[in-house]
Amino acid sequence: MRFSRTSKALGLAAIAALALTACGGGSTNSGSGGGNASAVITVDGSEPQNPLMPAGTNEVGGGKIIDLIFAGLVSYDSSGKKVNELADSITTTDAQNYTIKIKSGKKFTNGEAITAKSFVDAWNFGAAAKNAQLSSIFFEGIQGFDEANKEGSTVDTMSGLKVVDETTFTVALTQKESDWPLRLGYSAFMPLPSGAIKDPKTYGEKPVGDGPYKMDDSGWQHNVQIKLIPNPDYDGPRKAKNGGLVFKIYQNDDAAYQDLVSDNLDVLQTIPTSAIANFKKDLGDRTIEKPYAGNQTIAIPYYLPGWSGEAGKLRRQAISMAIDRPEITKVIFSNGRQPATDFTAPVLSGYDANLPGSENLKFDAAKAKQLWAQADAIQKWDPNQTFTIAYNADKGGHKAWVEAVTNQLKNNLGIKAEGKPYATFKEARNDATKGTLTGAIRAGWQADYPSLYNFLGPIYAKGAGSNDARYDNPAFDAMLNKGLGATSVDEGNKIFNQAQQILLQDLPAIPLWYQVAQGGWSTKVTNVDYGWDGVPLYYNITAK
């Protein structure tokens, strides 16, 4: 999860219609048919990278916790449709100036009242450069963001935010964005109690929220588990139907899978690659296979020697064309992935599989070798240098496909290539965030809200918190801004796809395949389903 804003390319109705129904077995009912509502459900998790501050959390381990212990102005239902949560109304007359009224009488779990100021203070904190929040760019459309977010700035408020009264505040944007309210379900826009801003580090260890769950008294047991219990005061659309959730932090997915098969884990979000061929046989109808808004890429930082300028561009294209995506998705994933043709995902409105430049994502070993030779003519690649792809060994089962990719690069380009495992996702993300990677890194994306833009701006715009490649192309950024100011969904989609044409030539990251949610659950639970973003609807799960 990361920096994001609303795209004119949302098309929510289309998402609901685009194959977001389960292809495998599994229970997809609402959970209203009974079950033990007091039972605690155990699920797999990963150690969050940072203290659990909403605007400072941009990876899935922490993001899943934030999404459950916070409620914002809006949330998204299972198909990606926006529904009001704390918002009473979000109105505008010109798509640039918004008036937001929140429901009165709402409180954080520490008893502090949730007011308009709770939102304004939280958003200002998230945007200010001095607070170094990874998702600060989500606020870039608000007037005053540039002053607050520029490096070295001491400004800590945005001029576009005004508190009107206890339950009303206004937002002035720098340009018209008619679909701006859709992004407000992303975690960066959550309200904060006053204590969070006074002492964010301490708060982030045991955050106080207002969502369907709250942190158990045992708190966050680092590298072991995070336990959540239902918030009895929450009355929104995501009311907990179980007695709580324990996110067990595993060091690898194979161990989690064995616990699942043995009924020692209730829900495993992602089946490891080692079990994909057999998981349906192992689990029977307790599985799900469902496309969602997510993809897998390899980001190659521009600060690495040999990967910038024209030579770097040619090498990126060579790397991309040396990868046989159909073969890997067939052999490694048993056809449980779809080879990528762009930087977004097919379930999104506006997706186009035939963009100019998409030929750079097609396997062509001869062309790849030719492009590598052209790059060598400009800047010679050291034949003793090894091209590495960093990946986390704890979650996701990445080792098998990384080895397959590096083998293809060795065979098709004649270079040294190998995987570089990190023990944990947190460690890998720390190096990516600090800009201290020594090679490429696997860099998937799970959508924050349903839009093409969410797969572009938060990852490839200059200065974006998830810009692992440190990509900087003014023409690309200008096209993104033009798309954000479009007056219709369709027009915005067209412009964002023009921006993609730039990416497909520059390839700051190499798109590999689109993700499919492949998960399973134990014999002890029911009512398991996944949302449009590939995350289980944890609040809906019940024990049998």
Image: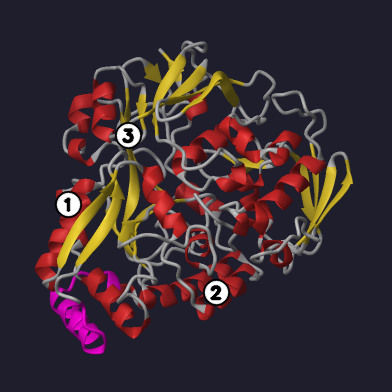
Which residue is disc 1 drawn over? 330
Dot 3: what SS? strand
Q: Is residue 193 magenta?
A: no
Say which label, 3 or 1, has the lower sequence index. Answer: 1
Q: Can residue 148 be seen by looking at this rendering?
A: yes
Callout 3: few (<14), some (14-19), or many (20+) C-alpha neighbours within 10 Å?
many
Query: Hey, which quadrant is residue 488 in on the image?
Result: bottom right
> What's the coloring here?
secondary structure
Dot 1: what SS? helix
Cα gap from disc 2 to disc 3, whole angstroms: 37 Å
Is 131 drawn above or below residue 150 in the view shown? Answer: above
Residue 141 spot, x, y in % from top left: 68, 63
Q: Residue at x 18, y 84 (%)?
A: 373
Which residue is disc 3 drawn over? 519
As shown in the figure, which amino acid type bears the numbered disc 3?
Gly
Badge number at residue 477 = 2
Q: Are marks 1 and 2 in contact (CB under 8 Å)?
A: no
As shown in the figure, which amino acid type bears the numbered disc 1?
Lys
Left or right of 50 on screen, residue 423: left
Residue 279 spot, x, y in % from top left: 21, 32
Frontmost of labels 1 and 2 is 2
- Span shown in magenta: 359-381
Dot 2: what SS? helix
Residue 437 spot, x, y in % from top left: 36, 60
Left or right of 272 on screen, residue 470: right
Residue 320 spot, x, y in % from top left: 26, 69
Frontmost of labels 2 and 3 is 2
Q: Residue at x 55, y 74 (%)?
A: 477
Query: Hey, which quadrant is residue 268 in on the image?
Result: top left
